[in-house]
Amino acid sequence: MDQEIITPPSKPKATDTHAFGPVASFLAAAGATAMTFSLLAAAASASVWAFAKLFGLPDWLLYGVLVLSLVPVLWATVWISLRSWHVEQRLADNKDVDSPVFRIGYYLKKVR
């Protein structure tokens, strides 16, 4: 392959004025949280409803399983909100993003 690698002539200058702050971190975390909740809740509801209608389950069982399906949706939503807050805080401190830890308690200890 005859492709040339283009490199910039110099590194960009680091500035002290980044768009990071508590409000920006909160907005990023809130956006990720809202998106996670809405997408996972819609997917769980559609899956449970389709399964119940496919097998002809009664409505009371459908509603019970819908309530049960809310548990993993809420867990994932809380985890995403804590993880996104953690990542935003690391980026604000000019640190690299670390590997995710899939325990809610890990991020609860690190909330500032």
Image (cartoon, rainbow, N blue to C red):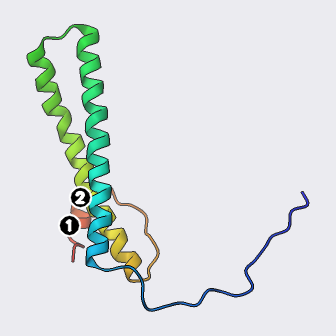
Q: Residue furthest left?
A: 60
Residue under the image location 21 percent in, 62 percent down: 105
Q: Which mark is residue 104?
A: 2
Q: Residue furthest right?
A: 2
Relative height, residue 31 to residue 98 (above, below): above
Rendering coords of residue 25 (x, y %): 30, 72
Q: Residue furthest top?
A: 56
What is the secondary structure assignment of the residue under circle 2? helix
Q: Which mark is residue 3?
A: none
Number of marks in the image? 2
Relative height, residue 38 to residue 22 (above, below): above
Rendering coords of residue 81 (x, y %): 27, 59
Q: Amino acid at mark 1?
A: Leu
Q: CA distance from mark 1 to mark 2?
A: 6 Å
Relative height, residue 55 to residue 29 (above, below): above
What is the secondary structure assignment of the residue under circle 1? helix
Categorize mark 2 by other alpha carbons within 10 Å: few (<14), some (14-19), many (20+): some
Q: Which mark is residue 108?
A: 1
Q: Are marks 1 and 2 in contact (CB under 8 Å)?
A: yes
Quarter containing the C terminus? bottom left
